Image (tube, rainbow, N blue to C red):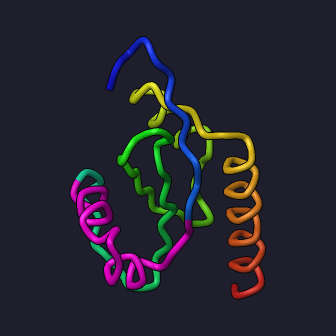
């Protein structure tokens, strides 16, 4: 990607791994799992972002311990920032995961 241009990532979906593997996002999920040396589990969640004005997608695993700032750092390495609305949706989703997990324990 051109380092002189800042790209913007828009959250397009949050899916289970199983749903993502049965979609056109399958390869993106597999690549992210390989990068993170992560075993794919059907019920794990992934956030799928489109890099605006491109055909590029980025996938990140999401759970109650996800640090949005670390995710933003990963995007920054690619000269990409998350748009405001997508960041807010993701923050609320992670917060709901935390509350849901606390109730289960």
Residue at 78% x, 73% y is 99
Q: Is residue 60 left or right of residue 103?
A: left
The answer to whether residue 17 is magenta is: yes
The answer to whether residue 105 is magenta is: no
Q: Position of residue 91 (x, y in %)?
A: 72, 54
Residue at 46% x, 76% y is 44
* Image quarter in which the N terminus is found: top left
Q: Provide the residue span drawn in magenta.
A: 13-34
Examine the rendered structure and indicate whether residue 79 appears above or below residue 101.
above
Q: Main secondary structure of the magenta part?
A: helix
Residue at 39% x, 76% y is 20
Q: Position of residue 77 (x, y in %)?
A: 41, 27
Q: Position of residue 18 (x, y in %)?
A: 38, 84
In the image shown, does 95 or 5 lie closer to the viewer? 5
Q: Position of residue 73 (x, y in %)?
A: 51, 32
Examine the rendered structure and indicate whether residue 54 appears above or below residue 32.
above
* Image quarter in which the C terminus is found: bottom right
């Amino acid at each position: 990607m051109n380092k002189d241009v800042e790209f913007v990532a828009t959250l397009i979906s949050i899916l289970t791994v199983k749903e993502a593997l049965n979609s056109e996002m399958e390869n993106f999920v597999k690549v992210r799992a390989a990068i993170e040396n992560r075993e794919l589990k059907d019920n794990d969640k992934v956030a799928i972002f489109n890099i605006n004005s491109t055909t590029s997608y980025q996938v990140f695993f999401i759970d109650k311990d996800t640090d949005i700032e670390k995710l933003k750092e990963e995007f920054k390495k690619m000269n990409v920032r998350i748009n405001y609305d997508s960041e807010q949706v993701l923050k609320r989703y992670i917060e709901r995961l935390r509350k849901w997990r606390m109730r289960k324990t």
